[in-house]
Image (cartoon, rainbow, N blue to C red):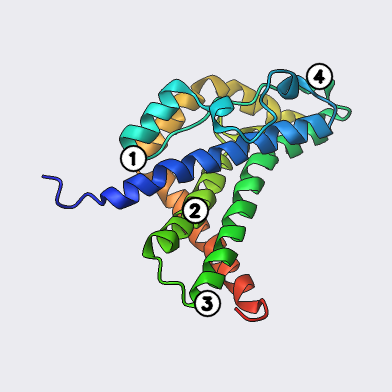
Amino acid sequence: MFGNIDLVEIALRIPVLLLAITVHEYAHARMAYHFGDDTARLMGRMNLNPLSHLDPIGTLMILLAGFGWAKPVPINPLRFRNYRSGMLWVSFAGPLANFIFGFISLVLLAILVRLGVQSTLLIRFLGTLVQLNILLGVFNLVPVPPLDGSKILAALAPGSLLSLYRQIEPYAPLILILLIATGLLGRIIFPVYALILTLFNAIVGLLPGL
């Protein structure tokens, strides 16, 4: 029954996801503070302690399904010095942090391979860091509430499009569930994931000695 389950991969995903979502939420909090909103800092969310960002149900999903989510960082956009710029960059900060984290992990992985490191577990850990950070970044850029992509779209959209977007916003959770259930979300995410991974590999290949 459990012959096809990779227990090592499941064990690796848990700490990797904790690291990825912690970096993601910290980036939101830090960028909000940069734009003048210290709500997250005052609530103890502007740190890299995973315990500050864990959501009970999301954590349970990490343990049971190997994927989950964190508590959204509280922000008060009315405190931003520039509302649209603040919303844009605070929303983009989380996915961007995951892409940076994934790229750094890929560089470290390339260095270890170049040095001939034989630790299979360490290699797999870094490989999982690369994959899940990129996937988490891409997933959060999907423009469906409550994902970050929806807030980025709202910050960039002209008034007429924003008004239409607000009308369909109440149905967003159902739309997201349908995208997941029908497999359409995967058809959107994985080609973008593959493109970013290819780009990262190309950049790493240009680094001296790698």
Mark with earlier residue (2, 1): 2
- Above or below, 10 relative to 46: below
Distance (Cα) linking label 4 and label 1: 37 Å
Q: Quadrant of residue 65?
A: top left
Residue under circle 4? 78
Residue under circle 1? 182
**Quarter placement of the C terminus:** bottom right
From the top left corner, tell me how far across and down residue 123 is, in percent: 44, 63
Mark with earlier residue (3, 2): 3
Q: Quadrant of residue 153?
A: top right
Contact (Cβ within 8 Å) of mark 3 with mark 1:
no
Q: Nearer the viewer, mark 4 or mark 3?
A: 3
Element class at badge 3:
helix
All told, the count of numbered labels is: 4
Residue under circle 2? 129
Element class at badge 2:
helix
Element class at badge 4:
helix
Distance (Cα) linking label 4 and label 3: 50 Å
From the top left corner, tell me how far across and down residue 206 is, in percent: 65, 78
- Above or below, 196 relative to 69: below
